[in-house]
Amino acid sequence: MVGWKSLTRNKLFWPIVALAILMLFNLFFTPHFFRVEIKEGHLYGNVIDILKNGAPIMLLAIGLTLVIATKGIDISVGSIVAISAGVVAMLIGGDLKGVPKFPIPYAMGVALLISIVAGCWNGLLVSRVGMQPMIATLILMVAGRGIAMVTTNAMVVWLYAKPFAFLGQGYWLGLPFSIYIVAFLVLLTAFVTRRTALGLFIESVGINPTAARFAGINAKNIIFGVYAFSGFCAGVSGLVVCSTVMSADGNNAGLGYELNGILAVVLGGTSMNGGKFYLLGSIVGALIVQTLTTTIYAFNVPPEIAQVVKALVVWIVCLLQSGKFRSTFAAMFGKRELSV
Amino acid sequence: MSETTPIIEMRKIKKVFPGVMALSDVDFRLFRNEVHAIMGQNGAGKSTLIKVLTGVYEQDSGEIFLEGKSIRPDSPLAAQKLGIHTVYQEVNLCLNLSVAENIFIGKEPMKFGKIDWKAMNRKSEEVLARLNIDIDVTKTLSYYSIAIQQMVAIARVLDSSAKVLILDEPTSSLDEGEVEQLFKVIKKLRDDGLAILFITHFLDQTYQIADRITVLKNGEFIGEYKTEALPKLELIARMLGKELSEFHSTTHDEEKKKASAQAVTDTGTLMSARNLGRQGSIAPFNLNLEGGDVLGLAGLLGSGRTEMAKLLFGIDGADQGDIFIKGRKTAINSPRNAMMAGIGFCSEDRKNEGIFAELTIRENIILALQTRQGVLRFLSMKKQQEIADQLIGSLGIKTPSGENTASQLSGGNQQKVMLARWLATDPMILILDEPTRGIDVGAKREIMELILDLSKKGLGVLFISSEFDEVIRCSTRVAVLKDKAKIAELSGEEMTESGIMHTIAGGK
C-alpha cells in the first residue's frame, strides 16, 4: 500500500493522529466538548478556547522551531514574554479611564523591538561567543524575569485601554483574533524559509555545521538570526498574553512557556538534533499541548496528578514518532505491515 | 637488553570487523628499556593493535603474553591493572582541575575519610620530578602548555606498577621545543626500565626516538626492524607495501603521459600562494596552479597535505603570506571567500565535513551553488532538479532519484555528490582531499578519470591522495610534503613513486 506508506512517512501524520486521538477521547468522555455556540456573533466552546488559549505557545513555538532546527535551544522565551508584556503595559499605562500613556501601536512596537534585542543577545552569545545554547539562553531566562520585574516596578500592572484588549480577546469573523496572528506569522515564516533558500541553510547548519561552513554558508549569521527571530516571536506572544489578561505580571507572565513551546516543537516532528523542521507540525504540537491541558481541566483532575497525565501522553506521542519504536512494535504484533 | 624475554609479546593476532580484516596474524614484541614505534599508513591496523593490547577490543584469535604469561585484558582498566598504560592523542584530562588532582584523580590519598591534600600535592611533585618537571601542582591544568599537560597525562599513569607505556600520537600538537622536552622524558623513562610504545606519523621523530620499528600495512604484519638497520627510504617502501626494486621500474604510465600532453588548454596561472603559512599547521610554502594543471600533493599521513588544502580554502586563516587568484592578491579567510573566488573543496572527512546525511541528494548538490547565489535568489525546484539530475547522470551517481537522502548512498557515491556540489558552482579550481579514500576500485578509477576530464576543460585541480601511484597517474606535477612543510616539487621524469619516496626520505 504505497499511499498508506507515504502518508505515514509524512512528518505531520503522527502529530495529527495524536491530536485526533485526544479529540476522539474527548468526544466520548467530555460532555459538550465539541459544542460550539454562537454568542454575540462569536463562536464559543471548548474547541475555540483551545485555539485561543494555545495562541501564545503557538507563537513562540514558531521561533523555537527554527532555533531547534539549528540544533539549538532557547529557554529564555518565557522570560521574553514577560519582558514584552511588561514593556507594553508600562507604555500604555494603568490609567483607569483607559487613556494610553503612549499610542498603543507605538507601545507594541517598542515591546517587540526590545524582544528582538533580547533575541539578538542570545544569538550573540551562541553564534559569536560560542556558548552552549542552553547556557546562553539560561542567562536571559533568569535575568529576563528580573528585567520584567524592574520594568513593572515589581508590581502587577492592570490595563484599561480597551482597544488593546482586541489582540488577545477580540474576535474577527467569528474567530479569536489571536488565531489570525498565529496564522499570519506561520505563513510569513513558511514563506520566508521555503520560498528562499533560508530554510535549506537553516537545516544544513543544524545537520552538519562544519560541512555547512565548508559549503560557504555563513553559519554564524544564520544562528544569530534564528535566535533574534525567536525573541521576536516570544515578543508577539507576550503582547497577546498581556492583552488577554489586560495585565502584566513580571513574575508569572509566560512562566513555563519555554517548556511547553519546546514540547510543541518536538511533538510536531522537529528533532532536537537539528535538521529538518516542520512549522505546521509545531502548531499541531501546540494544539496537542493545549488540548491536553483543557481536557485535564475539563475532568477536574487535581493539578498534582495533571502533570503526570500530561507527561504520560507526551511520552506516548514521542514513542509513536520514533521510527525505531514503530518498527519494533510492528515486528512484535505485526503480520500486518505497520510500515515505517 | 635481553632479546630473549620481551615484556609484551603478541602472537598471530587476528581481528575482523564486519567486512574488514583489521588485523591478520600480526606479531608484535615489546622489550624493556626500549622505545618501539609502530608505523603504517591509514588503515594499517596500528590503532586496532593497540586497542587489542589495551583491552578495548578482544582479538578473534591469537595470544598476548605479558612477561611470558598469557593475558587477555577485557577492558582498559584490566590492562592498567596489568601495568599497561596508554596516553592518548587527545589529552583526556580535566583542564579545570589542579595538576595534582589530575594526577591522583580516582586514587586520591585519604586521611580520616578526607582527601589528604598535602600528601597529594607532595606526591604529585615527586612524580613530576621523575620527569624532570618542576611546576606548581596546585595551579589548574589549563594554566600550562599542551606539552606540560601531555606530561601530566604521562605522570598520571606512572605508578610503581607501570610496565608498559603506550603513547598515541603524543607530539601532534606540540611545537619543536616541546617535542624535545617530551623526548627527554621518554628517554628517561626508557632508561628507568619502562617499555614504551610510540605511535606517530612523523618520520623524523621516529628516527630520533625509536629503537625498534614494527611496520604494518592493511592489517598485515610487514616486519620488525632495529631502527638503525632500516633506512628511511626502506621504511617508506615497507609502509606502502612495495619492494624497493619495484619503484625504480615504475615510470609514467602511458595513459597519463597522453593526458598531460592533451592538457594544454592553458588558461594561465589560476592561483598562486606566496609564503603562505600558519604556525603549528604548515610551514610557509609557495605554490602555483595553472589552468589544466593537476597538482598532486604527496606525503605521508600527517605531512601537512590537508593543512595546506585548508589554508588555500580559507578554512584555517593563514598567519603569513598571500594568495593570488589570477594574478590578483585575494584575501581568502573563509570558505565563503574561497568559493566566491572560484575555488571548490572536497574534504577528506566526508561524514563530518562534507555530506548532509539527512538532506536529499538534490539538496546536497545544489547547496554550494545556492550559497553563492545568495539566500534570496532561491533556485526553482525545476532548476534544482535539472542541475542535480544532470550531475547525477554525468558523474554516474547510483541512486534511484535525487530525492533520496544522501545517507542512503555508498561512500563512493557520496564522494561524487560532494564533487557534484562543487562542479555545480562551475569552479576554476578544485581542491580534492583524498577523494578516493574508502571507496571501491571501480569508483576510484571513475573519480580519477573525472579529474583528468576536468583538467582538460581548463580547471586547475589540487589532488591529494595517500596512494602515490594514484597521485602520479593523475597529476601533471607533484608537490611533496613532509612533517608539515612542502619540501619539493617534482615534474616530468622525476615524478615517479621512487622519486617521491627518495624526496621524503631526504636523499635523491
Image (cartoon, coloured by chain):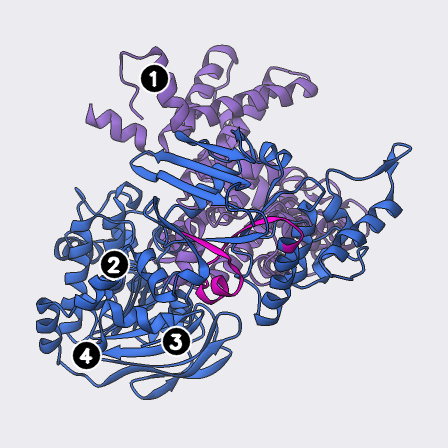
As shown in the figure, which amino acid type bears the numbered disc 4?
A: Gly
Residue at (10, 77) in percent of width and height: B261
Q: In the rendering, what colour is chain B?
A: blue
Residue B136 location, x and y as percent?
A: 81, 60
Do the residues marked 1 and 2 share a common chain? no
As shown in the figure, which amino acid type bears the numbered disc 1?
A: Ala
Q: Chain of mark 4?
A: B
Task: Please report the bounds of the magenta region as a residue range.
Answer: B191-214
The Cα atoms of the two marked residues, 4 and 3, are separated by 18 Å
Would you name the residue on which mark 3 appears?
Answer: B486
- In the image, is residue A69 part of the stretch drawn in magenta? no
Would you name the residue on which mark 1 appears?
Answer: A330
Do the residues marked 3 and 1 share a common chain? no
Which badge, 3 or 2, is on the more N-terminal residue?
2
Chain letter matching colour purple: A
User: Which quadrant would residue B62 be assigned to in this image?
Assistant: top left
Residue B377 location, x and y as percent?
A: 31, 65
Would you name the residue on which mark 4 appears?
Answer: B492
Mark in front: 1 vs 2: 2
Label 1 packing within 10 angstroms: few (<14), some (14-19), many (20+): some
User: Disc 4 vs disc 3: Cβ atoms closer than 8 Å?
Assistant: no
The Cα atoms of the two marked residues, 3 and 1, are separated by 58 Å
Residue A157 location, x and y as percent?
A: 76, 47
The Cα atoms of the two marked residues, 3 and 2, are separated by 26 Å
The Cα atoms of the two marked residues, 2 and 4, are separated by 23 Å
User: Which quadrant would residue A278 be assigned to in this image?
Assistant: top left
Q: Is residue A50 left or right of residue A144?
A: left
Q: Chain of mark 2?
A: B
Q: Is residue B508 left or right of residue A283?
A: left
Q: Chain of mark 1?
A: A
Mark in front: 1 vs 4: 4
